[in-house]
């Protein structure tokens, strides 16, 4: 196996983490005061890591490009967070959560990591409640749960449609406590532009103050990258406008391997693209699939009539509707995992059944939920001989209480009332399962450089289940890194402060300056966004929801050419020593232009379909993904050697000792 | 749609800014307000001018980054939304739109339409937390039942996204709605009640230090708040603070 | 910390504003109860009113209350000025376009102006009556009390003021304007006072709001009627 050592502890699966925690080195409290840690990114993973490390006594510096840690994009997660609490008594357990996650990830995740995730999931909920996170509750005062895609139990905790914001605020409040104590120094409106490696170890970063433009050096004994995913390589995604891969990509170029870049999640329920002006896509929570039914017209002529505005969806008779998820996957119905639901929508739209102007939308219909809840309400309120309107009205009220804010959001964007006419949805890029390769300790291939949350590749395999991203971010930050980093830092208690005047810092800083100056001095003609949009088009069309060898090869060439053009013809107004969003974007797009190529290269090499990676050449007769466990049951970790196209592949073979590898079926 | 845009331009924090007028054509009613500004910026870049700098990030109304005083109202004329959720269909062809930064002594302008809202951060750092360790050695999440109405009220207070529209809308540039939302969320939960006294005193003290104005109960904040945070929270903070100060 | 919290903090200023304001609402009720006696006619009216005035100026408890009232007005004014100055400082650079009318009521934004009008009125009002009673010349009519003591005749002073052929109606109109200002001041101030003191509960909010509106309309209206009644209706003296 060579270079990659996953460092998974020995012993039975359920005992690995406990045993590991007992075996690893600790740093005594007095020594922790002499150790500095840098955390890049302040979402759920970064924020929770920073808070906990500071609480343990380390001196922590956090960096985020936003004006407040609380604005990191974890905030936008809507639906919920999974935990194997089994409060509903429906047979949930750590093992079942582990099993669902590995299966949902199409058997491309590391067993030991996923089990640990399931094991600490319950603790996350305890922790968050203690911090004052206002989860939804039942009348008895206990926590409520709901169900998400790809599972058969109710294990998702939620706070209406804004679970991410509530969890992040909890995490941010923990950070605030440490900021108030002076243990965290929070650098907002700062962007990490490079990592500094001294004697083979990560020892600091170069950051740019986005207000003044000043280039700053920050040293530490260890660096955590928790800067999120790279979905914005597609230009249009549900990520925030500022979400970027620069931190992760820069460390990749300095030696950290990048794993499974082609594993990208396309979320099935997003608001469809409305025009060329579109700057981002908005997700509608997966929780809507609990009550909404997805359909397209059965007949092509009806679909055409709807597209041309001659027919309203509400006018279409029940028997003329194709509830294709319920038809194809009777066991899971509308709650199949995201990759399956997305592909099914694409399949129907490609076949000509799309329902909006562009032909890229399907319906998410709540009318049967209105009736179902309405009947329930009529029964509990003991209303006799209720009219159909009354039932409908009461049903709408129930749905409003559950998803009101999502419905309102939809109406504001689309200008259609989803209580009266079904929502239109289409898949969009949402989450990237791939990321920096890390071992069991969440350490990358560079010693002292750790990666957490969406920035690492670890827990979701080829497809992430709903409500698992929040769980993973917080698990990494609250419960994993604080232990495993201690193990690494134990060797650093005598090192003393890392100086920032070393030649390594000089070099890193001058390279950063060089790139910034190159942008400012490039007298090109096209804006950064122009290149970003063109990159996004290549990615979406050829490296998107379904891929084939020919398209991928074309994409690689096109991205290379676009990159060359970018460096020749990009136009960046303004200067370096000032607030300059165009300059920030230029740096990010430059990195996306490299990452995109590696992404396509990875997709091309993986000659199988699994999870979010669907190769048209590898599918069953029914159009389902066809995995090749014999040849591809490994993590593809790429080593940078100068150009993204020349990256060297390292394989971490995946072994499943506690779970039977099967063909994923949701039928 | 064709629009006349009157936009506040200011080179940096120390520069004297002023309104500049731009004409913009080809605006699609389905565009969001920020996408309209994107189009303007692309035109400015092509012409060799500096684009208008404004804060924005998630563009789905939850991160609280976008601000903007649009035609005299924070987040523009629509209700219950942030600027990024404002759509051009709210305007008419030929309209003149005035776009300014949020104004408050505690929100100094950094550049153009971008303001520094770190005063909000400092208010939260002063005490906006529950002092529990993040070690995970807490009690089971269901060991303390919380009445649903209390939990819901805490949730509604917690929906504040910290955008600063309350301050921008208030004639006194007061931050009471923001501060009270943070105070309320924790005061309402049994977990946060324990240190409610310390918290409210510390947070109000910091709020005063930052130079926000006082509350005269005009209610403008509640109307303009994209998340509909209720004035009830301010009353709760008044109550909590009164209790805390006589203790 | 707790001590300075009740004196210097922003919230303390709200409490004092609310507390003094609501106290002054009570004062208004008391004052109105006295004034309404002016609506009485006939021979007993003068005696009744003057006996009441005597009681109000000599009773020690009432004297204490009147001092508290003056102090409240003073505090309310000073606190209001401090708040206004602080609030101005909180937004040194104003908006080019600001449309507060879209999100708040006029009265709530103009308590300072309304208050200034009211303060000016109070000064006029005090010169008219309190000043006359205290420092007025000898031409004031004398009233002999039930106990035989001779005091100034407030009833006659009041009625004469508003029945003055040249100035009577002018005074009545000035009083009307002042009462309108008070009405708007109360329209916002009454409910605002409760909110500032933290009294806000979904169950009772409606009651407080409605009471406030009723108070803001009825009390100033009753005050405003009296001068016109004296001018137009009451038999001339």
Image (spheres, rainbow, N blue to C red):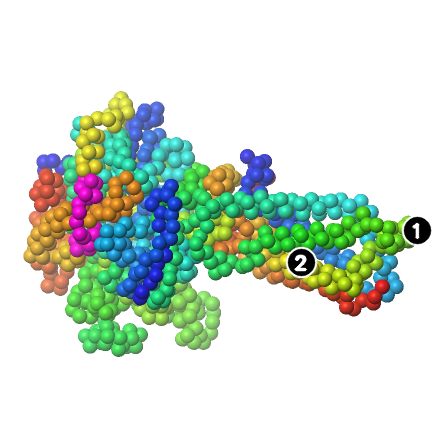
Q: Nearer the viewer, mark 1 or mark 2?
A: 2
Q: Nearer the viewer, residue C135 or A273?
A: C135
Q: Residue furthest front?
A: C166
Residue tagged 2? C178
Secondary structure beneath disc 1?
loop
Q: Marks 1 and 2, Cα distance to the nearest angstrom?
A: 37 Å
In the image shown, does B191 or C52 lie closer to the viewer? Answer: C52
Q: Position of residue A234 (x, y in %)?
A: 20, 54
Q: Work out whether C175 lies above or below A491.
A: below
Which residue in the structure is indicated by mark 1? C148
Q: Give yes or no for residue A531 being in the magenta stretch.
A: yes
Point out residue A42 in the picture as x, y percentages from the top left corner. 31, 42
Q: Residue furthest right?
A: C148
Give yes or no for contact between labels 1 and 2 (Cβ–Cβ under 8 Å).
no
Figure label count: 2
- The image position of residue A577, as x and y in percent, is 28, 39
Q: Image quadrant for the C terminus of chain A? A: bottom left
**Is residue A507 in view from this perspective?**
yes
* Residue at position x 31%, y 69% in the image: A422
Query: Which chain is disc 1 placed on?
Result: C
Residue A250 sits in quarter:
top left
Q: Residue at x 81, y 60 (%)?
A: C160
Residue A407 in sight here: no
> Are marks 1 and 2 in one subunit?
yes
Image quadrant assignment for residue A271? bottom left
- Crowding near pointer 1: few (<14 within 10 Å), some, many (20+)? few
Name the foreground residue: A486 vs A122. A486
Chief SS of the magenta region: helix
Q: Say above or below: C36 vs A490.
A: below
Residue at position x 11%, y 35% from top?
A3
- Which span is picked out in magenta? A515-536
Q: Is residue A212 left or right of residue C64?
A: left
């Amino acid at each position: 196996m060579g270079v990659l050592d996953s460092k998974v502890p020995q012993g039975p699966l359920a005992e690995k983490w406990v045993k590991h925690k007992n075996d690893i080195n600790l740093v005594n409290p007095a020594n922790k005061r002499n150790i500095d840690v840098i955390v890049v990114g302040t979402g759920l993973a970064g924020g929770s890591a920073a808070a906990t490390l500071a609480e343990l006594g380390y001196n922590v510096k956090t960096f985020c490009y936003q004006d407040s840690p609380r604005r990191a994009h974890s905030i936008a997660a809507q639906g919920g967070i999974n935990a194997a609490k089994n409060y509903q008594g429906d047979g949930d357990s750590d093992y079942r959560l582990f099993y669902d996650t590995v299966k949902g990830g199409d058997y491309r995740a590391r067993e030991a990591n996923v089990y640990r995730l399931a094991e600490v999931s319950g603790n996350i909920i305890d922790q968050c409640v203690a911090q004052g996170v206002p989860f939804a509750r039942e009348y008895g005062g206990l926590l409520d749960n709901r169900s998400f895609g790809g599972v058969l139990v109710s294990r998702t905790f939620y706070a209406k449609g804004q679970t991410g914001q509530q969890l992040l605020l909890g995490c941010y409040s923990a950070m605030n406590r440490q900021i108030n104590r002076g243990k965290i120094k929070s650098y907002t409106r700062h962007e990490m532009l490079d990592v500094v490696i001294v004697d083979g170890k990560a020892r600091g970063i170069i950051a740019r103050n986005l207000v003044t433009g000043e280039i700053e050096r920050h040293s530490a004994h260890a660096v955590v990258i928790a800067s999120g995913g790279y979905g914005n390589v597609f230009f249009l995604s549900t990520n925030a406008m500022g979400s970027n891969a620069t931190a992760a990509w820069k460390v990749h170029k300095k030696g950290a391997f990048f794993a499974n870049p082609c594993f990208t999640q396309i979320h099935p329920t997003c608001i469809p693209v409305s025009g060329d002006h579109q700057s981002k896509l908005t997700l509608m929570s997966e929780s809507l699939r609990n009550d909404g039914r997805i359909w397209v017209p059965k007949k092509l002529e009806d679909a055409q009539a709807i597209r041309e505005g001659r027919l309203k969806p509400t006018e279409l008779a029940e028997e003329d509707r194709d509830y294709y998820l319920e038809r194809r996957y009777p066991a899971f119905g509308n709650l199949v995992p995201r990759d399956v639901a997305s592909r099914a929508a694409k399949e129907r739209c490609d076949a000509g059944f799309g329902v909006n102007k562009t032909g890229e939308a399907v319906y998410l219909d709540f009318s049967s939920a209105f009736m179902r809840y309405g009947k329930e309400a009529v029964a509990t309120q003991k209303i006799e001989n209720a009219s159909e309107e009354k039932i409908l009205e009461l049903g709408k009220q129930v749905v409003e209480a559950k998803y009101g804010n999502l419905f309102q959001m939809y109406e504001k964007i689309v200008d259609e009332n989803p209580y009266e006419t079904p929502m239109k949805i289409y898949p969009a890029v949402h989450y990237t399962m791939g990321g920096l390769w890390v071992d069991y300790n969440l350490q990358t291939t560079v010693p002292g450089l750790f990666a957490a949350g969406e920035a690492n590749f670890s827990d979701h395999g080829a497809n992430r289940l709903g409500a698992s991203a929040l769980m993973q971010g917080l698990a990494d930050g609250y419960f994993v890194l604080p232990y495993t980093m201690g193990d690494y830092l134990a060797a650093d208690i005598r090192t003393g402060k890392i100086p920032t005047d070393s030649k390594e810092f000089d070099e890193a800083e001058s390279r950063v300056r060089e790139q910034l100056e190159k942008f400012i001095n490039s007298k090109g003609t096209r804006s950064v966004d122009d290149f970003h949009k063109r990159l996004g088009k290549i990615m979406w069309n050829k490296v998107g929801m379904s891929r084939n060898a020919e398209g991928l090869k074309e994409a690689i060439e096109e991205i290379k050419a676009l990159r060359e053009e970018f460096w020749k013809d990009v136009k960046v107004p303004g200067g370096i020593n000032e607030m300059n969003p165009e300059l920030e974007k230029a740096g990010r797009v430059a990195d996306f232009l490299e990452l995109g190529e590696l992404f396509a290269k990875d997709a091309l090499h993986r000659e199988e379909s699994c999870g979010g990676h669907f190769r048209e050449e590898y599918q069953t007769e029914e159009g389902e993904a066809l995995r090749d466990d014999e040849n591809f049951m490994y993590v593809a970790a790429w080593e940078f050697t100068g150009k993204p196209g020349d990256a060297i592949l390292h394989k971490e073979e995946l072994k499943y000792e506690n779970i039977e590898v099967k063909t994923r079926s949701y039928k | 749609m064709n629009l006349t845009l009157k936009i506040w331009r200011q080179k940096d924090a120390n520069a004297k800014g002023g309104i500049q007028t731009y004409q913009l054509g080809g605006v699609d009613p389905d565009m969001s307000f920020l996408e309209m500004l994107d189009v303007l910026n692309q035109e400015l870049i092509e012409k060799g001018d500096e684009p208008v700098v404004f804060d924005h990030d998630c563009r789905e109304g939850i991160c609280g980054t976008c601000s903007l005083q649009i035609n005299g109202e924070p987040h523009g004329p629509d209700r219950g939304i942030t600027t990024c959720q404002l759509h051009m269909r709210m305007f008419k062809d030929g309209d003149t739109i005035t776009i300014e930064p949020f104004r408050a002594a505690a929100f100094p302008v950094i550049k153009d339409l971008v303001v520094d809202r770190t005063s909000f951060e400092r208010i939260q750092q002063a005490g906006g937390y529950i002092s529990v360790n993040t070690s995970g050695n807490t009690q089971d999440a269901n060991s303390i039942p919380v009445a649903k109405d209390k939990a819901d009220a805490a949730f509604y207070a917690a929906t504040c996204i910290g955008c600063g529209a309350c301050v921008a809308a208030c004639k006194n540039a007061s931050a009471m709605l923001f501060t009270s939302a943070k105070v309320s969320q924790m005061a309402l939960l049994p977990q946060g009640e324990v240190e409610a006294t310390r918290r409210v005193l510390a947070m109000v003290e910091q709020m005063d230090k930052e130079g926000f104005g006082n509350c005269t109960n005009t209610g403008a904040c509640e109307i303009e708040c994209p998340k509909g945070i209720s004035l009830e929270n301010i009353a709760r903070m008044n109550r909590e603070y009164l209790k805390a100060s006589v203790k | 910390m707790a001590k300075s919290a009740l004196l210097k903090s922003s919230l303390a200023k709200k409490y004092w504003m609310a507390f003094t304001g609501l106290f002054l609402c009570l004062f208004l009720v008391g004052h109105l109860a006295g004034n309404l006696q002016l609506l009485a006619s006939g021979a007993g009216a003068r005696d009744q009113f003057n006996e009441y005035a005597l009681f109000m100026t000599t009773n020690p408890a009432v004297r204490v209350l009147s001092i508290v009232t003056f102090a409240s007005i003073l505090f309310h004014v000073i606190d209001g000025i401090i708040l206004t100055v602080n609030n101005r400082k909180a937004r040194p650079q104003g908006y080019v376009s600001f449309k507060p009318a879209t999100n708040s009521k006029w009265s709530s934004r103009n308590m300072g102006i309304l208050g200034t009008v009211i303060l000016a009125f109070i000064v006029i009002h005090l010169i008219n009556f309190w000043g006359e009673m205290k420092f007025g010349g000898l031409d004031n009519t004398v009233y002999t009390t039930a106990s035989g003591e001779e005091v100034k005749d407030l009833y006659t002073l009041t009625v004469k003021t508003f029945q003055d052929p040249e100035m009577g109606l002018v005074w009545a109109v000035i009083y009307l304007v002042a009462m309108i200002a008070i009405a708007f001041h109360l329209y916002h101030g009454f409910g605002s006072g409760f909110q500032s003191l933290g009294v806000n509960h979904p169950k009772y909010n409606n009651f407080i709001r409605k009471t406030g509106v009723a108070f803001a309309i009825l009390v100033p209206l009753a005050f405003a009627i009296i001068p016109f009644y004296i001018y137009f209706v009451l038999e001339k003296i």
